[in-house]
Amino acid sequence: MDSILKIRNLSFSFGPKIIFQGINLDLMPLDSYAVWGPSGVGKSTLLKIVAGLIPSIEGSIRIEGVEVSSASQRVWQDFRVRLSLVSQEGALISNMSIYDNIALPLRYHTRVGEEEVAKRIGALMTTLGIDREADRVIPALAPTGVRKLAAIARALILEPSLLLLDEPTAGLEETAGRRVIQTLKAYQKKRGAALLLATLDAALAGSLANRLGLLRKSGIVLEGPPSEILGKITKEEIES
């Protein structure tokens, strides 16, 4: 079975400051990997590099066998269908309604009609528990939870094989957070997708990930099942 994501010797610096170096990671279909570490260690940056939003300094990233650094614009357009990123902020387009934000990938990357668009959006909004009264509301006027759920719905709408999730349940009430976890697990099983998760939420990592890696400047220094790794990580290790 081929890997969905293969990372080799990945490094990133911000000016003279090394954020991380020497990251190696493989994700197969149905893998869920939680990247764990303190604020500033580069968890969000790692996801953005994989998504093609930030260039790495050195190393290799292969998505479904294709080397990202040498991929053409046409190939990257194809990647946009096969991978999705949910950032902490949600990154919804400010002058578009919640409904149109979710619909955007379908309208841009496919030729499905508006009836099918409405059908798919309705199913996702129901599954995630998004109030349909938010359909025509712009993000700035929507509650934080609605914005986060809309960003997750937008990421799922094209059924990507690789999902990049940056604290996907942050800012959500407990019930909504559980629904997100259930939705992501059901989606992953249905699609055979791989999940790469950046979080400091132990409950989320334990519920969603089958592997967890402790990220430090020197790379991923501990890796294994979440329950095993979390038991080894002390408060001092996280904060140092």
Image: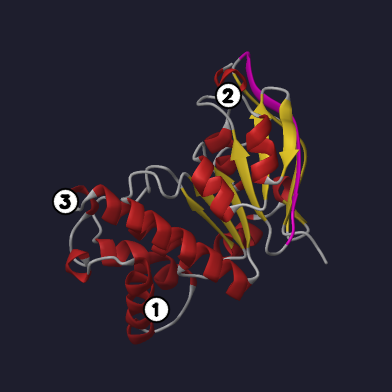
Number of marks drawn: 3
Question: Which residue in the protein does label 3 denote?
Answer: 141
- Circle nearer the viewer, 1 or 2: 2
Q: Give x and y (percent) for residue 49.
A: 60, 41
Q: Which of the pair 207/49 is nearer the observer?
A: 207
**Identity, as a three-letter code, of the amino acid under mark 1:** Arg
Q: Which of the pair 137/72 is nearer the observer?
A: 137
Magenta residues, as a range? Answer: 16-28
Q: Residue at x 36, y 69 (%)?
A: 103
Q: Which mark, by number, is residue 120?
A: 1
Q: Residue at x 54, y 70 (%)?
A: 187
Q: Confirm whether residue 77 shows in the render.
A: yes
**Identity, as a three-letter code, of the amino acid under mark 3:** Leu
- Circle nearer the viewer, 3 or 2: 2
Q: Residue at x 67, y 55 (%)?
A: 72
Question: Where does the N terminus fall, quadrant-wise?
Answer: bottom right
Which class describes the residues within 10 Å of circle 1: few (<14), some (14-19), or many (20+)?
Answer: some
Question: Which residue in the protein does label 2 denote?
Answer: 238
Which class describes the residues within 10 Å of circle 3: few (<14), some (14-19), or many (20+)?
Answer: few
**In the image, residue 76 lies in the stretch drawn in magenta:** no
Q: Which of the pair 134/10 is nearer the observer?
A: 134
Q: Give x and y (percent) for residue 190.
A: 59, 75
Q: Give x and y (percent) for residue 59.
A: 76, 36
In the rendered structure, are the residues bearing label 1 and label 2 in contact, judged by CB atoms less than 8 Å apart?
A: no
Measure how far apart labels 1 and 3 are at the Cα level: 24 Å
For the rendered model, the colour scheme is secondary structure
- Compared with 236, 54 (above or below) is below
- Compared with 147, 74 (above or below) is below
Tag 3 secondary structure? helix
